[in-house]
Amino acid sequence: MDSINENQEEHTREDLVGAAAIEKIRELIDKSGSCFFVTSTSLNNSHKSRPMSVQKTDKAGNIWFLSAKDSMKNLEISTDTDVTLYFQGSSHSDFLELSGHALITYDRAKIEELWDPTVKAWFTEGKNDPRISVIQFIPDSGYYWDNKHGNTVAGIKVLLSAISGKTMDDSIEGTLNV
């Protein structure tokens, strides 16, 4: 039996490296804004996975978060820096998985740079809250799945495929190596 990718004429795979990988990472994170942040170790039967809002994705592809220094997540990172992030920008596209490692800092200038008033819900004393830490996620590799022409064109292609019986998937996927 042929795979779906073998049954279509369109190019559906593109592995990205370096600057192209970073550009794709930034594009997909901009669409999502938040992720599931998964640590590699579980202490005290913690869940290992929690939703986190991205504060910034820099030009090098590093992803920045604000976190409570007394959180289980920070404790887990201090034990094992390996982290995986999962993003979903929409219900049908903009999927991203990243593997890398996390560093925790208490750099006041970085906290100032990343501060957003909505974060005050977690840090009630504002940007000077003594519980704030910064997590820098440094990606090593990942995988993405997206569509090439937006959700409207992808939807039309799926509909035409169902009618014609010919595969016209508009997806594109591949590995990311930073």
Image (tube, rainbow, N blue to C red):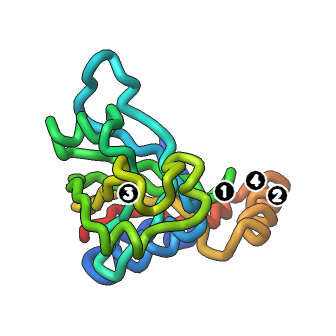
Mark closer to the chain start, 1 or 3? 1
Q: Residue at x 39, y 63 (%)?
A: 174
Q: Residue at x 40, y 25 (%)?
A: 47
Residue on which the image places disc 1 = 90
Mark 3: amino acid: Tyr
Residue on which the image places disc 2 = 159
Foreground: disc 4 or disc 2: 2
Q: Is the C-beta separation of discs 4 and 1 under 8 Å?
A: no
Mark 4: amino acid: Gly
Mark closer to the chain start, 3 or 2? 3
Residue 164, quarter of the rendered image: bottom right
Mark 1: amino acid: Ser
Mark closer to the chain start, 2 or 1? 1
Question: What is the number of the mark on residue 165?
Answer: 4
Q: Nearer the viewer, residue 105 or 58?
A: 105
Q: Is the C-beta separation of discs 1 and 3 under 8 Å?
A: no
Mark 2 Cα-neighbour bin, 10 Å: few <14, some 14–19, many ≥20: some
The reply to whether residue 86 is in sight is yes
| Mark 3 → mark 2, Cα distance in angstroms | 26 Å
Question: What is the number of the mark on residue 143?
Answer: 3
Foreground: disc 3 or disc 2: 3
Mark closer to the chain start, 3 or 4? 3
Where does the image place residue 99, in percent across and percent down from the top left? 28, 52
| Secondary structure found at label 3 | strand
